[in-house]
Image (spheres, rainbow, N blue to C red):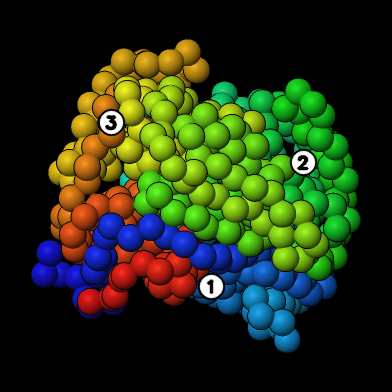
Amino acid sequence: MTNYDAGDVLTVHGGTPLNGELRVRGAKNLVSKAMVAAVLGETPSRLYDVPAIRDVEVVTGLLELHGVKVTRGELDGELIFDPSNVESANVDEINVHAGSSRIPILFCGPLLHRLGHAFIPDLGGCNIGGRPIDFHIQALREFGAVVDKSEKGMDITAPDGLRGAKLELPYPSVGATEQILLTAVRAEGVTELRNAAVEPEIIDLICVLQKMGAIIKVHTDRVIEIQGVPRLTGYNHRPIPDRIEAASWGAAALATRGDVFVRGARQADMMTFLNLFTSVGGAFEIDDAPGTGGIRFWHPGGELKAVAMETDVHPGFMTDWQQPMVVALTQARGLSIVHETVYERRLGYTAALNQMGATIQTYRECLGGTPCRFGRRNFMHSAVIAGPSKLHAADLVIPDLRAGFSHLIAALAAEGTSRVYGVKLIQRGYEDFEGKLNALGAHVELG
């Protein structure tokens, strides 16, 4: 573990309940996509409440490489995008970003409309299971794009322009749905997408595109219809709050027997999480005050209860909520069952929890009735958690973004001093998490 610099290691003195309040900003999974959407406009766009996270830095760099001028507005968290000089970027410069984000694939449609050409490097992102780009590439070909693979990535052109198409996804993939939306809005004719993802961040992206002049109909049966338009203008938009971060802090309050008010969190986006949170024995309270409202999460005392949990696409229990909640479930009495149906390698982090004193057994079998995205292939994707377990400190290495925050919660709930390595991964999706922890009374320091 000597390869980590001081800014990538967090020392956590555990055993103290988290108490206090914090604020969540715009959703990571919407903000980055809205930034890409700005390329489609012929006038500047303005995005508010943008979190200071690594993913925003990566997308800003990609936009600037393609000639989009990105400036900060007068308000805290306000970014302005001027796409009037969009241009092709140097392949090697784009490749600098390869491995740090999967966002580059979403530039395809906007760049094809603006330039007639796009280059996409090999993609990175968290190693939590297969997130194939086959859906993306096949969809682009249906629109009329020509995809040529090279050593460094993919060259994509549209010699005859892009035309609307009838598409059906084999799985309601969020990324593929975003790709199709960003491509279809300026494609000639009508696009019909079946089995689309309908997560709150997708609906918010549709709101962004509608503000730009797009014509998009969302039907109740996962069908989205897009009528292409010849031009789009910029937008002014305040994104939905980050429901993943909000739930992570809620799980942290539960695991540490604390009381945390998450300013900005919205009930409508988190109903499935709140149902499970209550079933486990947590308590919450909604404050709907305009501008200052949020959700208070707390441990009401007594024992937590074991539950059965399955992840699923929206409106099911979000896969990104699973890992933080499992830490809380190590403190529940009885046997909790978890069935991860979205990403096949998302339970690897449980080995670190076992190292800290948890009792978690993983299984290849489906311990639940929800169909898995990855079929019957041989992956450890179910778990049984026996609790309550007394967690103790350990040295932990973060494998990916959401597992990293779960390791952090475990270290906060454990007795003793833990060292968490690779915390820069957490900065991809959690703004100023160290400052927020200190504000909640946690005893942590970098280095």
Res. 25 mark:
none
Q: Earlier in the sequence, mark 2 or mark 3?
A: 2
Check contact, mark 2 vs mark 3: CB within 8 A.
Answer: no
Between marks 2 and 3, how big is the CA–CA gap? 55 Å
Amino acid carrying mark 1 in the image: Ala
Q: Which residue is mark 1?
A: 52
Q: State the SS at label 1.
A: loop
Q: Residue at x 81, y 35 (%)?
A: 218
Q: Which residue is mark 2?
A: 163
Between marks 2 and 1, how big is the CA–CA gap? 37 Å
Q: Earlier in the sequence, mark 2 or mark 1?
A: 1
Asked whether 30 or 327 is in front, the reply is 327
Residue 440, image x, y percentages? 45, 67
Is 278 located above or below residue 301 in the figure? above
Amino acid carrying mark 2 in the image: Arg
Splitting the image into 4 quarters, where does residue 9 fall?
Answer: bottom left
Q: State the SS at label 3.
A: strand
Q: Which residue is mark 3?
A: 387
Question: Marks 2 and 1: which is nearer the front?
Answer: 1
Can see residue 6? yes
